[in-house]
Amino acid sequence: MDLLQSWGIELAVHLQTKYSSYEGLFNLASTVADLHTTFFCLFPIWFHLRRDTALRLIWVAVIGDWLNLVLKWVLFGERPYWWVHETRFYGAESAPSLRQFPITCETGPGSPSGHAMGAAGVWYVMVTALLSLATEKQCPPLLYRFLQVGLWMLMGVVELLVCMSRVYMAAHFPHQVIAGVITGIIVAEVVSQQKWIYSASLTKYCCTTIFLTSFAVGFYLLLKAMGVDLLWTMEKAQKWCVRPEWVHLDSAPFASLLRNMGSLTGLGLGLHSPLYKGTKKSTSTTFKMGCITVSLFLLQLLDGWTFSSENHKIFYFLSFGKSTVALLIPTTLVPWALCWLFKGEKKDKKQ
């Protein structure tokens, strides 16, 4: 394993040396690949254009990130930015010098890569949705073939950029991002085959949320009782990150778990709210575009709300609440508000 990871370090050094001018692109790729983009940008758009795809996006993102957390706890993957300082692989020779960036110092284990896994799952859902739409519209065979090849190639380029960015940032080894891509596609395919996610009741949303949370917490407590410290990476991140302010609690395992559970809870509450049922009849293009625009605006305002991580319990609670509201805004609150405004305008015109 040390030999494999040393090759990864060599590749990271090569990328940082030869492709330093692409730092902005790699930083953008890592930022966009974060599931935060799915919840705050992609979901509102897809929800008002093609709701079944939006539901798949959330379920794939949540299940995938939950599985990523469990796998990281099982695999105990190192991260380049601390491994290079602690390994004895180089012996008396000096270890390679790796640059660090504001998004390098993640606090969880490194395998598999969550960014690569999440991006693979999300892009798989979007590509298959677009191809399905082309089939429904009876796209000519030659054009469909061109579209199919083009979309899969686009996904491949995006994934390559994401993988390169994670290695460039010294956040992951190459084998970790490859494992993330493969696992993400598998999760997306398996979840997409589950038809019940499109008509799940509020009870099923709640039960799924409770089960996933309980399993993760129970697994953590079980291994802790066996003497296994699943938060061993926190100390390494704080020790080897060149700047303390780059170590963020929101990259910790339980922070991501509660964000995802909050998103699933928000989706369930939104879809089964009486307010949502009253907006399902509104299908005009103008209404949909209005919902998308307002939702994205409000979500950017919500995203600007940050809170202190000094008290971990309060931080986790607020993270859960913020994620819940982020899904309620596009599913229920914005459509209901616009329906109410449009009805008020129609009444005024009639009078």
Image: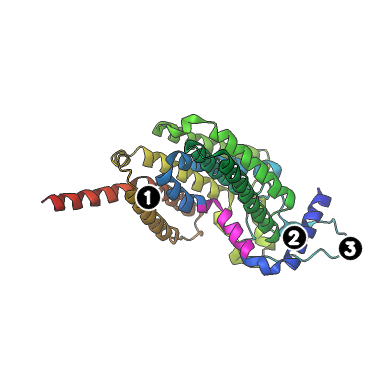
The reply to whether the C-beta atoms of the residues labelled 2 and 3 are less than 8 Å apart is: no
**Residue 38 position within the rendered picture, expressed as x and y whole percent measured from the top left:** 51, 50
Q: Which residue is mark 3?
A: 92
Point out the residue furthest to the left here.
Answer: 351
- The overriding secondary structure of the stretch rendered in magenta is helix
Crowd class of label 3 (few under 14; some 14 to 19; many from 20; radius 10 Å): few
At x 37%, y 50%, the residue is: 329
Q: Which residue is mark 2?
A: 12
152, above or below 215, in the image: below
**Residue 10 position within the rendered picture, expressed as x and y whole percent measured from the top left:** 80, 59
- Element marked by disc 3: loop
Who is closer to the viewer here, 65 or 153?
153
Q: Which residue is mark 1?
A: 329
38, above or below 28, in the image: above
- Element marked by disc 1: helix
Crowd class of label 2 (few under 14; some 14 to 19; many from 20; radius 10 Å): many
Q: Earlier in the sequence, mark 3 or mark 1?
A: 3
Q: Earlier in the sequence, mark 2 or mark 3?
A: 2
Bounds of the magenta segment:
25-37
